[in-house]
Image (cartoon, rainbow, N blue to C red):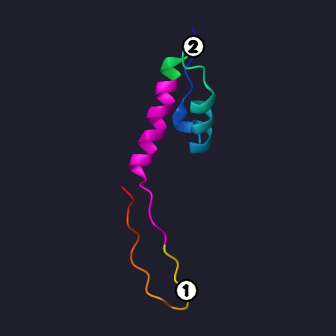
Amino acid sequence: MAINPDYKNYSSDDLEDVISNIDKERFPQRYNDAVTELHTRTIEKPQTVNNTAKNDEYVPNEVPIL
């Protein structure tokens, strides 16, 4: 019996690599688990717009990208 990887311990880059290279037909559950883990991370940590002050300019708060 094969042991499924614990994708919670993988970096996001590693998960993207797994998703791109896994044999989806042979390992459909592993593929779904990797996609689900990566999706969960993107929901928990939304991307933000990072504005950097130049010459003491006003910089608004970071705004989530939806």
Q: Residue at x 47, y 28 (%)?
A: 33
* Magenta segment, prevailing SS (helix, strand or loop): helix
Residue type beneath disc 1: Lys
The region drawn magenta spans 31-50
Residue, disc 2: 26
Quadrant of the frame with the C terminus: bottom left
Is tag 2's residue or tag 1's residue first in the polypeptide sequence?
A: 2
Q: Residue at x 52, y 83 (%)?
A: 53
Left or right: 46 as drawn, with respect to 2: left
Depicted 41 relative to depicted 31: above or below: below
Judging from the image, what secondary structure is the residue with disc 1 in? loop
Q: Position of residue 8 (x, y in %)?
A: 51, 36
Using a 10 Å C-alpha cutoff, classify the residue at mark 2 as few (fewer than 14 neighbours), some (14 to 19) or many (20 or more): few
Using a 10 Å C-alpha cutoff, classify the residue at mark 1 as few (fewer than 14 neighbours), some (14 to 19) or many (20 or more): few
Which label sits on residue 54? 1
Judging from the image, what secondary structure is the residue with disc 2 in? loop
